[in-house]
Image (cartoon, rainbow, N blue to C red):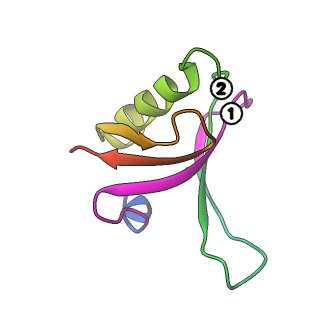
């Protein structure tokens, strides 16, 4: 699990980009370091919810509220695995 301090390094202008992996066996936010050193590290959020009827998106919002005490909204990518979320507080 990523610490709140480490998470803040990825927030730029109250926006956070991440890749969502729905229908996973775990609920966890991890930092993935690519093998190619020219690429930036990527945040991956593993969700247990299925990507059906907005269930994964709702779980994403609840996850950030519960684990990091952050109110968020999905700015772009509601129907994609690549998401940009806006930090509201």
Dot 2 and dot 1 residues touching (CB under 8 Å): yes
| Residue at 52%, 41% in the rendered image | 77
Between residue 78 and residue 65, name the one nearer to us: 78
**Residue with the most extreme right position:** 35
Q: Secondary structure at mark 1?
A: loop
- Name the quadrant containing residue 88: top left
On the picture, is 70 further left or further right than 32? left
Q: Quadrant of residue 62?
A: top left
36 to the left or right of 74 = right
| Between marks 2 and 1 in the image, the one whose residue lies nearer the viewer | 2
Q: Which residues are magenta?
A: 10-29
Q: Which mark is residue 48?
A: 2
Q: Quadrant of the C terminus?
A: top left
Q: Which disc is residue 26 wearing?
A: 1
Element type where label 2 sits in the image:
loop
The image's mark for residue 7 is: none
Q: Is residue 16 above or below residue 37?
A: above
Q: Residue at x 76, y 80 (%)?
A: 36
């Amino acid at each position: 699990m990523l610490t709140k301090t480490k998470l803040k390094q990825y927030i730029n202008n109250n926006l956070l980009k991440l890749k969502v992996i729905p229908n996973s066996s775990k609920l966890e936010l991890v930092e993935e370091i690519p093998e190619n050193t020219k690429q930036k590290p990527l945040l991956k959020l593993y969700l247990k919810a299925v990507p059906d009827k907005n269930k994964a998106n709702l779980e994403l919002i609840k996850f950030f509220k519960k684990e990091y005490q952050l109110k968020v909204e999905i700015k772009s990518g509601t129907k994609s695995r690549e998401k940009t979320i806006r930090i509201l507080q």
